[in-house]
Image (tube, rainbow, N blue to C red):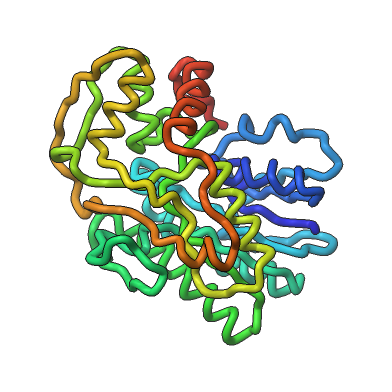
Amino acid sequence: MRVVVTGGAGFIGSHLCDHLIGKGHEVVCLDNLITGTTANIEHLAGRPDFKFIKHDVTEYIYLDGKVDAVMHLASPASPKDYLRFPIQTLKVGALGTHKALGLAKSKKARFLLASTSEVYGDPLEHPQRETYWGHVNPVGPRGVYDEAKRFAEAMTMAYQRFHRLDTRIARIFNTYGPRMRIDDGRALPTFVSQALKGMPLTVYGDGSQTRSFCYVSDTVDGLYKLLLLNYTDPVNLGNPDEVTILKLAQEVGEMAGIKPRIEYRPYPEDDPKVRRPDILIATTRLGWKPAVGRREGLAKTFEYFKKQGAEPQPKN
């Protein structure tokens, strides 16, 4: 296949480009680099089966030749990034999704939307199933990301129903691993950076809030399997191994060989108290489940950040 990956220079997107090429496909990577970096894809430069185009997907997308699939991952994804780029986040969820769907429609290509567990908001159902409609504050600070993705899902379903476009929707839960930016503001890279620098680990609230962390190779494997499967309803992709943020901080401290000092800070507005995916559909329909446990994944991620010197990656 010839596959277009929007946001392909980002954390998950770059791993997806690697995975697709490893499966023998040709990849066209589109990214405007506001949160992605060419450092994530520089090892692919010069390959005949890979092409990078710096492009803002909120603008019209034109490509020569056939396209078999469009995988739409473009969006700021961490709270730090989407609070720094609120308008761009809303635009890529709305206009960017519209343009990516338009490309798929014009090329008669399959379309996959990388949505998020944030469509569930601060959930009243636990664990979260795909049938749950969510508990989202549309006017809160996190609404720019939550509602952008909810709109993107609605737009994708509209193209499926009205234009008969062949679509997929993946709801990705917290993903981690190499190529995360150490400064992206999410809990795991922040803890690792602080631990390596001997700083206190900052925990918001009392640390009892939970998350479910999925290693990036598992997430990418799920995205690829979903692309190939004839299944058009949303599918959760995440690791149901739930952990409190306080315990995660302690585990990172152990990786660093220290007993971490915890610095507690006020709980952010609308931050979810719990997060754990129900992955019954993924396991039964995709034949997918996470293969990398948290301790193994944390060790790989920790080593990556040590090699990076726990410094922010260069921006383009």
Residue 24 image point, x, y percent: 81, 48
Residue 113 visible in the picture:
yes
Look at the picture and state if 175 lies above or below 123: above
Count of labels in the image: 0
Residue 111 image point, x, y percent: 64, 67
Identify which residue, 225 or 4, lies in the foreground. Answer: 225
- Left or right: where does residue 182 sit relative to residue 121? right
Q: In which quarter of the image is residue 68?
A: bottom right
Look at the picture and state if 286 lies above or below 51: below
Residue at screen point 41% across, 63% down: 148
Residue 38 image point, x, y percent: 63, 34
- Left or right: where does residue 288 sit relative to residue 47? left
Identify which residue, 212 or 310, lies in the foreground. Answer: 212
- Left or right: where does residue 139 sit relative to residue 117? left
Residue at screen point 59% across, 46% down: 13
Residue at screen point 53% across, 81% down: 158
Furthest toward the bottom, the residue is 162
Q: In which quarter of the image is the N terminus?
A: bottom right
- Left or right: where does residue 126 sit relative to residue 307? left
Residue at screen point 43% across, 58% down: 116
Residue 256 image point, x, y percent: 36, 16
Q: In which quarter of the image is the C terminus?
A: top right
Identify which residue, 217 or 96, lies in the foreground. Answer: 217
Residue 94 visible in the picture:
no
